[in-house]
Image (spheres, helix red, strand yellow):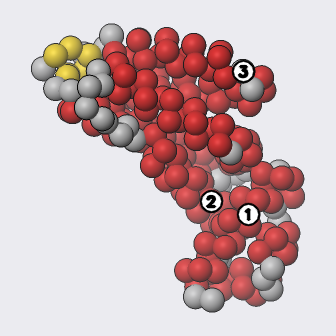
Amino acid sequence: MSAQERRAELVSAAFRVVAARGVAAASVRAICAEASMALASFHYVFATRDELMAELVSVVVEAERHAMLPDLTPGETFRDTVRLGLERYLQHLRSDPQREKAMLELTQYALRTPGLEVVASTQYERYCVLAQDALATAAERWDMTWTMPVDQIARILVVVTDGVTLSWLVTRDDAAAARALDFTADSVVGLAVAA
């Protein structure tokens, strides 16, 4: 197994451990056991457990980027495009709730662990960049201009999706999540004008 394959398998194993038992249970030993690897294999590709946790956040955020970017089809409106991006996020959440629970726990863990605060701030900066890219892509394709800086709209979008995520994880109420995303799409579209 190559170092790259070993690294990817350890990240996957870490995710499974965190999702099933929480960050506190995700010791190097537990992660290696989940990956069916010797402990020495871990230190061959990661210097520390914290490095692995940072990589785990990066991998999950990148997967979310692919899930959220709008896939435009002919005949859609600008509002439909924004709403589709939000719907894709909700579908991504519903497809693997354990992933989102793990991400929420990783965020809290990073905030509570001295020296790891940067993992949480990096995670949220990536979320904001992802939202900003999606908003910019939608506006460009529909020849729209934002009436306020797109990075500010992106931050608002991240706040909303965080709320929808936590609420849905608690209630599993698809209709309530859809209503929140409809309201969000309407609000976001109201911040754009034809270029």
- Identify which residue, 23 or 16, lies in the foreground: 16
What residue appears at the point 45 percent right and 40 percent down from the top-left corner?
A: 68
Kind of residue at disc 3? Asp
* Residue 102 at x, y percent in the picture: 72, 47
Q: Is residue 127 above or below residue 86?
A: below
Can residue 11 be seen by looking at this rendering? Answer: yes
* Residue 89 at x, y percent in the picture: 53, 35
Q: Is residue 21 above or below residue 136?
A: below
- Label at residue 56: 2
Kind of residue at disc 1? Ala
Residue holding disc 3: 173
Kind of residue at disc 2? Leu
Residue holding disc 1: 14
- Label at residue 149: none
Circle 3 crowding by C-alpha within 10 Å: few under 14, some 14–19, many from 20: few
Q: What SS does tag 1 mark?
A: helix
What residue appears at the point 58 percent right and 62 percent down from the top-left corner?
A: 55
